[in-house]
Image (tube, rainbow, N blue to C red):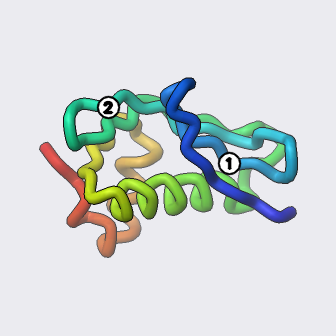
Amino acid sequence: MELTVRDVPESDRYEVRDGDRVLGLAAYRRDGDRVVFTHTEVDPGAEGSGVGGTLARGALDDVRARGLRAVPRCSFIRGWIERHPDYADLVAS
């Protein structure tokens, strides 16, 4: 698998893809300089292969690169940040 993560602002989500196939998404809404993550899902056939982690890291790296803050309302993104404290500085209340 060659995974890529990209923002799809017209759909309010980040997608993780293997070529043309969408394997997961992290839905969000923008609130000023904050990206509120509301839901994450990964294709059941891709679970356990690191797709979710790649998605979380890619989305949060993009948030950081844009100088924004993250609000992890989604339990997956919140849990991922808790396991990767080097991303805790992105969290806004």
Return the residue nearer the eye: 51 or 21. Answer: 21
Please say if 14 is above or below 59. above
The numbered disc on residue 30 is: 2
Q: Is residue 40 visible?
A: no
To which residue does mark 1 refer?
A: 16
Say few, some or many: other residues with alpha carbon within 10 Å of mark 2 (under 14 / 14 to 19 / 20 or more).
some
Is residue 34 something that shows in the picture?
yes
Q: Earlier in the sequence, mark 2 or mark 1?
A: 1
Q: Marks 2 and 1, how far apart in space?
A: 19 Å
Toward the left, the furthest residue is 93
Dot 1 amino acid type: Val
Task: Please count the marks in the image.
Answer: 2
Give left or right: position of 33 versus 22. Answer: left
Residue 50 lies, in percent from the top left, at 68, 61
Is 1 positioned to the left or the right of 86 in the image? right
The quarter of the picture where residue 81 lies is bottom left
